[in-house]
Every structure is written in C-alpha cells, then in structure tokens.
Image (spheres, rainbow, N blue to C red):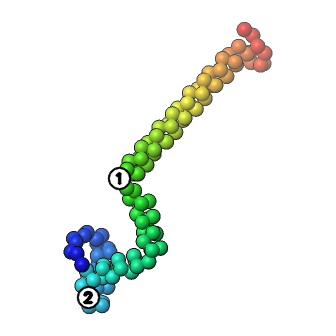
Amino acid sequence: MSRLTISIPAKWEQYLKQLANDHQIDLNSVISELCAWAFSNPEGKKQFKLWLDDAFPPKGEAEDKARDAGTRERAREEEAEEETEEEAHEDGNYNEDIAGEDVKGEFNP
C-alpha cells in the first residue's frame, strides 16, 4: 500500500475519525476500506467516473465548457440588446404614427 497525504473536509474528517475510534482502527484503514468498498465493482467505478467528470471535468473539457458558456452568455446578451433596440424602434414608429393625429383620431399632416 502506498502512503499518500490528502486533505479531508473537517466535517468528514470528524465523522471518519469517529468511525475509526468506534472500531478501534486508524483513519488510514477506514479510508482504505472505504475506497475498496466504493470501487469493488465495475458499476461503482463507472458511476464515480461519471460523477467526477461532471463535477470536475478534465482540463480540456472544462475549458471547452467555460468557452461554450461564455459564448451562450454573449449570444443571450446580444439577443436581449437586439430586442431592446427593436422595441425602441417600434415605440418610435408608434410615436411618429400618432404625432399626425388630432385628439379625435383623425389624421392631419
């Protein structure tokens, strides 16, 4: 077995230490057994890999996702800007149309 130093979030560290104390084994044994249990079958390994890829995409995929998200955001912003411009233009046309009408709705150029 290789020795590796890892950081565990405090809430999990306390939980795992308590389990180790309850069973009178060291924390390394608890983590080793946890990994052995989690990855003991091919389906568990596959599920973990899918979760990991989604939660922390490989470097190239993460960059692609960030670039795609930025492109989608820019497209949404451009679309919203175009809609605002169209609405302003339509309002301007409406104001021009009613500018020549008198109070009775008759057109007087």
Q: Which residue of the protein is positioned furthest toward the top in this rendering?
A: 109
Looking at marks 1 and 2 on the same chain, the residue that comes earlier in the sequence is marked by 2
Front in this rendered view, residue 15 or 102:
15
User: Against 62, is 9 above or below?
Assistant: below
Which residue is labeled 2 in the image?
25
Residue at horizontal 35 percent and vertical 77 percent from the top = 35
**What amino acid is found at the position of numbered circle 2 in the picture?**
Ile
Residue 106, x across and y down, in percent: 78, 15
Mark 2, other Cα within 10 Å: few <14 / some 14–19 / many ≥20: few
Front in this rendered view, residue 55 or 13:
55
Residue at horizontal 65 percent and vertical 20 percent from the top = 93
Horizontal arrangement in the rendering, residue 96 relative to residue 9 (left or right) = right
Residue 98, x across and y down, in percent: 70, 19
State if disc 2 and disc 1 touch (CB < 8 Å).
no
The secondary structure type at the circle numbered 2 is: loop
Residue at horizontal 28 percent and vertical 85 percent from the top = 20
Residue at horizontal 44 percent and vertical 59 percent from the top = 54
The secondary structure type at the circle numbered 1 is: helix
Task: State whether residue 31 appears in this view.
Answer: yes
Task: State whether residue 18 appears in this view.
Answer: no
Mark 1, other Cα within 10 Å: few <14 / some 14–19 / many ≥20: few
From the image, state whether disc 1 or disc 2 is nearer to you. 1
**What amino acid is found at the position of numbered circle 1 in the picture?**
Lys
Residue 100, x across and y down, in percent: 71, 13
**Residue 59, labelled with which disc?**
1
- Picture quarter with the C terminus: top right
Horizontal arrangement in the rendering, residue 49 relative to residue 83 (left or right) = left
Separation of residues labelled 1 and 2 (CA atoms):
37 Å
Snapshot quadrant of residue 10 = bottom left
- Picture quarter with the N terminus: bottom left
Front in this rendered view, residue 41 or 97:
41
